[in-house]
Image: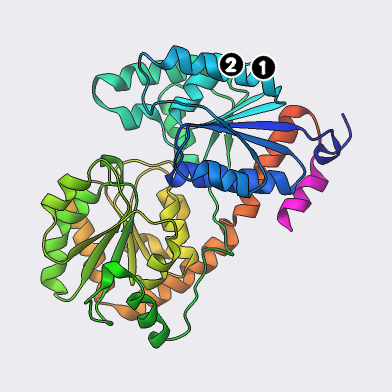
C-alpha cells in the first residue's frame, strides 16, 4: 500500500488498558490525543473510574468500558470474553495493549489475528515477585507469539526481556511528556513562594524551607518506604527541609505510620504541575520501572531529580546528572547522601535543573514519542505515515 496512513478510511486503533490512573493512563491519554489529531479513530477500552475515560473523551477518542481487575484470577475468562466481543464489534485495524493485565486478556482474545502491539510498561515478572513471578514469566514467553511488536519504553526494559527469555519482535520508543503542560512557570523567588502558599499541604511551611517532593502511587514499587527510612539522616543534615509525598495507594496507612518528623502527605491530585514547580528537588526511589514519568515531568519543569538505577532511569537523565542523581535501589544510605548533597548545594541544583530542562526538551517531547508510535503502526499496517506524522509534530 502506498497511500498515507491518515488518508485511509480512518484506521481504528483500539487501546486496551487496565490502569486508569498513574503513568500508564497518562501514556495512553497522550497517545490517543496525538492519534486523533493525526486523523485516526482511537478507542480506549479500560475499566470505569479513574481519569483515563475522561481524558480520552476530552482528546476526541471513543471509550468502551471494560471491567477488569488489576491481577489475574477467576474473573479472567469473563474479562477476556468481553474484550473479544468488543474487538468483534469495533473491528479495529490494530490493537495496542498497555500493562500486564491488558496484555494478558487482549492477547488471549485476539491471538494475533489483528496486528497487535503489546506495551508492558514494566515487566510483570519483576513486579509480581514470590511464587507469582514464575507463571508471569512463563506467560510472557508464551504470549510473545501473539504480539507483532513488544514495545518497550527503554532499552533497559528490552534487554531485561531478552535476558528473561521473552522471544519477542522488539521495538523501543522512550517515554515523552507534554512540554506545554510541564514547564517552568515562575520567574523569581517571590513568585515561587506564592506558588508554595497556594498548596494546602504546605500550610505553615517557611517560604524558603528546602522542599523535596516525591510523586507516585503509594505502593511497594515506588519505594516511598525507602525514602522515609532515609529521611532522618537528611533531616539531621538539613533540619528545616521538608518532604511531601504526593499520591495515594494501598500503602498509605503503613507509610503514614512509618513517617518520621518533617514528612507530609498531600494525597492524590489531578494537577501535579504545581508540586514540581514548588519543589527544590524531586525524588523517585522506585524498586522497578520501565521508564518512570515523574522524573521526566519534573525535569521538564526545570527541577533536578534523584532516582534509583532501575529500568530506564539511566536513559532518562542527562549524562552530567548521573553522578548526582542516580542511586542504587532499596539503599536508604545512598539515597540520603544524594538528597543531602543536592539540598546543601543550591548552585549545583540550579545547574542540574537547567540541564535537565534542556535534556527533556531535546529527547523526551511527547510529540516525538507519538510520532514514533505512529511510524510503528504504519510499519505493521504496511502504510507509510509521513503526512500523519507531521500532523502530530505540529
Crowdedness near tag 1: few (<14), some (14–19) or many (≥20) residues, C-alpha within 10 Å? few
Crowdedness near tag 2: few (<14), some (14–19) or many (≥20) residues, C-alpha within 10 Å? some
Q: Is residue 114 visible?
A: no
Q: Quadrant of residue 10?
A: top right
Side (left or right) of 26 relative to 365: left
Residue 378 picture location, percent across and down: 75, 34
Side (left or right) of 375 relative to 102: right
**Front-lying residue, 87 or 290:** 87
Vertical placement of 350 versus 131: above or below?
below
Please name the residue shown 61% across and 21% down the image. Answer: 86
Please name the residue shown 33% across and 32% down the image. Answer: 127
Residue 323 picture location, percent across and down: 34, 62
Is residue 388 one of those drawn in magenta?
A: yes
Checking the image for residue 347, the label placed there is: none
The stretch in magenta equals 384-394
Secondary structure mostly taken by the magenta-highlighted segment of the chain? helix
- SS class of the residue under badge 1? helix
Q: Quadrant of residue 56?
A: top right
Pointer 1 residue: 88
Task: Please tell me how many numbered marks the rendered image carries.
Answer: 2
Pointer 2 residue: 84
Residue 306 picture location, percent across and down: 33, 60
Colour scheme shown: rainbow
Tell me if label 1 and label 2 are in contact, CB under 8 Å. yes
Please name the residue shown 27% across and 67% down the image. Answer: 201
Quarter of the image for the N terminus: give it. top right
Vertical placement of 357 versus 370: above or below?
below
Amino acid at each position: 500500500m502506498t497511500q498515507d496512513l491518515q488518508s485511509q478510511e480512518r484506521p481504528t486503533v483500539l487501546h486496551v488498558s487496565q490502569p486508569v490512573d498513574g503513568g500508564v493512563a497518562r501514556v495512553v491519554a497522550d497517545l490517543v490525543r496525538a492519534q486523533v489529531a493525526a486523523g485516526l479513530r482511537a478507542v480506549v477500552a479500560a475499566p470505569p473510574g479513574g481519569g483515563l475515560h475522561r481524558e480520552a473523551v476530552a482528546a476526541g477518542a471513543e471509550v468502551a468500558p471494560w471491567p477488569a481487575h488489576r491481577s489475574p484470577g477467576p474473573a479472567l475468562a469473563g474479562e477476556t470474553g468481553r474484550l473479544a466481543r468488543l474487538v468483534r464489534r469495533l473491528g479495529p485495524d490494530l490493537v495496542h495493549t498497555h500493562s500486564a493485565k491488558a496484555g494478558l486478556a487482549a492477547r488471549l482474545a485476539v491471538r494475533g489475528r489483528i496486528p497487535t502491539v503489546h506495551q508492558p510498561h514494566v515487566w510483570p515478572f519483576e513486579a509480581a515477585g514470590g511464587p507469582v513471578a514464575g507463571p508471569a514469566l512463563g506467560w510472557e514467553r508464551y504470549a510473545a507469539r501473539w504480539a507483532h511488536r513488544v514495545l518497550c519504553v527503554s532499552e533497559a526494559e528490552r534487554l531485561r526481556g531478552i535476558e528473561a527469555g521473552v522471544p519477542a519482535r522488539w521495538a523501543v520508543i522512550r517515554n515523552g511528556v507534554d512540554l506545554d503542560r510541564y514547564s517552568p512557570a515562575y520567574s523569581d523567588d517571590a513568585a515561587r513562594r506564592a506558588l508554595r502558599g497556594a498548596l494546602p499541604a504546605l500550610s505553615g511551611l517557611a517560604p524558603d524551607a528546602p522542599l523535596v517532593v516525591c510523586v507516585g502511587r503509594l505502593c511497594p514499587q515506588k519505594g516511598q518506604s525507602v525514602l522515609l527510612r532515609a529521611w532522618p539522616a537528611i533531616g539531621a543534615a538539613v533540619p528545616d527541609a521538608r518532604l511531601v509525598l504526593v499520591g495515594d495507594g494501598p500503602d498509605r496507612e503503613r507509610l503514614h505510620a512509618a513517617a518520621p518528623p518533617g514528612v507530609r502527605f498531600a494525597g492524590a491530585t489531578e494537577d501535579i504541575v504545581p508540586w514540581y514547580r514548588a519543589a527544590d528537588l524531586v525524588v523517585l526511589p522506585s524498586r522497578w520501572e520501565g521508564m518512570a514519568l515523574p522524573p521526566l515531568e519534573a525535569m521538564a519543569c526545570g527541577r533536578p531529580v534523584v532516582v534509583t538505577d532501575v529500568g530506564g532511569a539511566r536513559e532518562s537523565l542527562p549524562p552530567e546528572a548521573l553522578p548526582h542523581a542516580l542511586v542504587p535501589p532499596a539503599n536508604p544510605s545512598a539515597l540520603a547522601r544524594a538528597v543531602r548533597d543536592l539540598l546543601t548545594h543550591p548552585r549545583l541544583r540550579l545547574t542540574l535543573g537547567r540541564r535537565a530542562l534542556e535534556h527533556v526538551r531535546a529527547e523526551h517531547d511527547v510529540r516525538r514519542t507519538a510520532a514514533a508510535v505512529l511510524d510503528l503502526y504504519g510499519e505493521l499496517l504496511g502504510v507509510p505515515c509521513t503526512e500523519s506524522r507531521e500532523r502530530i509534530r505540529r
